[in-house]
Amino acid sequence: MPRPKKAPNGNGSAANLGFEATMWAAADKLRNNMDAAEYKHVVLGLIFLKYISDAFDERHDALVAAAADGADPEDPDEYRAANVFWVPKEARWANLQANAKQATIGKVIDDAMLAIERDNKSLKGVLPKEYARPALDKQRVGELIDLIAKIGLGDRENRSKDILGRVYEYFLSQFASAEGKKGGQFYTPRCVVQVLVSMLAPYKGRVFDPCCGSGGMFVQSEKFVETHGGRIGDIAVYGQESNPTTWRLAQMNLAIRGIEAHLGGEHADSFRRDLHPDLKADYVLANPPFNDSDWGGANLRDDPRWKFGPPPASNANFAWVQHFIHHLAPTGIAGFVLANGSMSSNQSGEDEIRKAIVEADLLDCMVALPGQLFYATQIPVCLWFLARAKKNGKFRDRRKETLFIDARKLGVLVDRIHRELTDAEIERIAGTYHAWRGDKGAGKHMDVPGFCKAATTDEIAGHGYVLTPGRYVGAADVEDDDEPFEEKMNRLTAKLEEQFAESARLESEIRNRLRGAHDAV
């Protein structure tokens, strides 16, 4: 197996991990002509089975070793007490691999999924169970099983490194890329989530995402707490997802990480059927669908959530914004992704809603991101940050002030059409925000022309409540190279003359060669 390559952007990001990419290339070869949206569930379902089977085997071995002390390796409660899924015999990976070459492997997998759902109530209705369908090539399914068998490596060290979890996340991102626009419905690029999480810093409290996709916001929130020495149990995660297949992906993604989440008993639309009507969250993190025109707004004109004005029926952007505000606790803070148009639109009353939010002093920070970050769209997007209490004792008084960050020039291309923010760039954006808030140890805030500017509400009003950061941060300072203008002009002119002469020489040589080729004919 090749040594993992370091990401060119220094990230160790999902786009440039070592063996994960090798695994993806091998799995993708087995896809043949199957559509990525369909193949996604085939592969991710098997990775999920491998993950919980590995965890089960590890616990099983420990119980066998402790059998003399009364431990029963076949008692489901011994596993549930250790927060490990009980895997019945017919669903264990060894049984799948033993049958991988059989024509009945599809039914074996479906039966395994049903057995796991039967014995683990939290997974009921979540797992894919269509492996026996005639259209699915059973030979390729067997080859996939053999391929995935190489991932887990079974031992505690690799489980602690979350090898399977990393593969699962990497495959999610690759399927999002393969599906294009449809992929954006379930996957938010990791670097975008990292910016949101790094800025909000959800150490303790309730984290809510009412359009949670595959659950990436929750995964990154838990990673943040763990990385910074906090306790995972200090945060509680709540979510909702309207797409049934994406809701199942989220349940599997969180289960694979051991994250207990409250996603409701089924998929549901946040506008029409809010599954958490009384929730007041300390943190809202979200990436709602951009510019959604089919959200049922015409039937929700008098909804009590629209405190700042009824959102247009043709665009859900400001319905989402007000839904987030509705669910914020008195000291809560929200960070979310929206299309750039949300910063300046003046149609159907959106400008008045935006003005009301600014005048209510809820707008904390705006971040303009570069384009090409998303698999679903190449258009640039922005991040909104709203705070219920800008003066709450923990930070400096930020009332009647908003921070603007223009990060459009950041990021590196990881392939021909996709860009990512590096770890250093994420730290720069988040560090600027924390310094402005007055977080302990974050340093003193300084406006940087071309990058960041703290603007008053009066200044925002002077710009007609348009929130595009470029309007506020101005142009970056140009370094003076100390070369006198006349000398620079003479040098550049001489260089241009050289290039003209070289161009004429090359043109002459090309003509001579063409003439020679013609004479030879």
Image (tube, grey):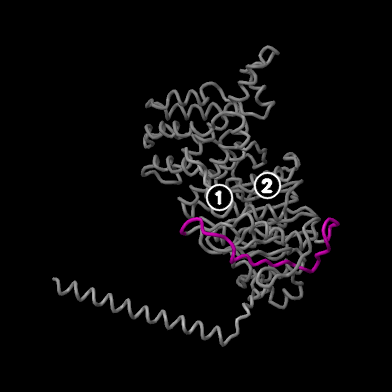
Sequence order check: which comes first, mark 2 or mark 1?
1
Per the model, the C-alpha gap separating discs 2 and 1 is 15 Å
The answer to whether one can see residue 313 in this image is no
Q: Give the vertical position of 107 relative to 408 (above or below).
A: above
Which range is magenta?
391-416
- Percent from the top left, x then y, of residue 330? 80, 55
Residue 187: image tag: 1
The total of numbered circles placed on residues is 2
Out of 244 and 155, give the one closest to the viewer. Answer: 155
Q: Is residue 405 magenta?
A: yes
Q: Is residue 520 left or right of residue 39?
A: left
Q: Residues within 10 Å of mark 1 (few under 14, many from 20)?
A: many
Residue 221: image tag: 2
The answer to whether one can see residue 98 in this image is yes
Q: Amino acid at mark 1?
A: Tyr
- Percent from the top left, x then y, of residue 190? 59, 51
Q: Main secondary structure of the magenta part?
A: loop
Furthest residue in direction left, as rendered? 521
Q: Is residue 513 left or right of residue 33?
A: left
Q: Amino acid at mark 2?
A: Ser
Residue at 53 percent across and 46 percent down: it is 17
Q: Is residue 124 left or right of residue 308?
A: left
Furthest residue in direction bottom, as rendered? 486
Q: Is residue 87 left or right of residue 43?
A: right
Q: Which quadrant holds residue 481?
A: bottom right
